[in-house]
Amino acid sequence: MSSYGNSKETSEVNSKDKKGDVKMDFETITAVQYPKLRMRRLRRHPKLRDLTREHSLSVDDIVLPLFIKAGRGINQPIASMPSQNQFSVDQLDFEIKSIVDLQIPAVILFGIPSYKDATGSAALDENNVIAQAIAKISKQAPDLLIIADLCCCEYTDHGHCGVVIKKDHGEFVVDNDATLELLAKQAVNLAKAGAHVIAPSGMMDGMVQAIREALDQAGFPHIPILSYAAKYSSAFYGPFRDAAEGAPQFGDRSSYQMDPANAARGVREATIDVIEGADMLMVKPAQNYLDVIYRVKQAHPAIPLAAYQVSGEFAMIKAAAERGWLDEEKAMLESLLAIKRAGADFIISYFAKQFATSIKPL
Ligand code: PBG
């Protein structure tokens, strides 16, 4: 009989097995080895490769972000995100039609309002750009799921995700609890406008609880919350900040978004949000945080998990492909599949239309 490793390793694994700590079927793994065992047998016939794939991707797994800008006649390409545009509501027809034709199940909306102020009051306006977009989309595409991103940063003149208190010496803090009051009102405004899912992305403590309570009290107990539970302070949001015109005017977001060095804490953030009433969780960004996706899914297998393939991840593939350094389609598919394999149930991606187009002939 062939064996694997030395006997010490074998007995260790076996003894752990008896205690039930390790699920590995050591006998099966070691019983058959090369040349009897040849893993390449399963890779030879393309159809057998397909049949035996552990993970797959379909258009049902993908959500497209849309940037909606106040005004008229706007259909503005975003330089750092090739193929993505800002749209004013009157220019959405064609985009909505192609989303429906490609059978993309859902969109997530980001608004660029006509005015910005210290508390993001445009987000509370009942007829703001997102309310108008929701009305337009639900009329033209009643079956499309509309997720509304909920955050202050696109609506505040300073670009932070909450109420800013300036201290002496140029120091500033984002006031957590004052921000919760705003988020609760914004959530109700989005639900009234007809959003099907509310997705808070501001990384304020207690935000899910505050939003859940507000929605329930306002008669929206049926509206689910998709919490950006583990959102990292990331350089890969760069292109988005151009697209959504919401870059912080001073400082950065590291006092509320997570430190990229922390993974276990991402799981803790997720658990807290589940306790506060999140119906779905999100990890963001995706590619550099596949371990966090994996851990959150392992910790909460019954909670649907989203991952956001953010603007910088998208832009990197686009830029390399433009130079001929990467095969764009293959890189797109591999990156999306990796996110799924790590444990995401669905993926928010700027590749949504391109992905749907690439698999359409099937
Ligand atoms: C705002 C928000 C951001 C993104 C989604 N919602 C930017 C940020 O936190 O600076 C990033 C999305 C992307 O990069 O594609 N709260």
Image (cartoon, rainbow, N blue to C red):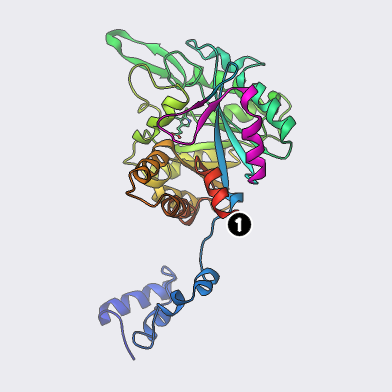
Range of residues picked out in magenta: 76-102
Q: Is residue 31 above or below residue 180?
A: below
Check the picture and name the quadrant holding the N terminus: bottom left
Q: Residue at x 61, y 41 (%)?
A: 279
Label 1 secondary element: loop
Residue closest to the eye, 36 or 264: 36
Residue closest to the eye, 284 or 21: 284
Check the picture and name the quadrant holding the C terminus: bottom right
Residue 340 horizontal side relative to residue 232, left or right: right
Where residue 273 appears, as percent x and y from the top left, is 53, 38
Where residue 127 appears, as percent x and y from the top left, is 66, 16
- Few, some or many residues within 10 Å of mark 1 (<14, 14–19, 20+): few
Q: For residue 6, which quarter of the picture?
A: bottom left
Q: Residue at x 42, y 26 (%)?
A: 241
Q: Is residue 156 above or below residue 140?
A: above
Q: Is residue 181 above or below residue 134?
A: above
Q: Residue at x 74, y 30 (%)?
A: 139
Q: Ligand 1, what quadrant?
A: top left
Residue 208 horizontal side relative to residue 136, left or right: left
Residue 313 horizontal side relative to residue 188, left or right: left
Examine the structure image and report whether residue 81 is included in the region drawn in magenta.
yes
- The residue singled out by tag 1 in the image is 361
Examine the structure image and report whether residue 341 is included in the region drawn in magenta.
no
Q: Residue type at mark 1: give it.
A: Pro
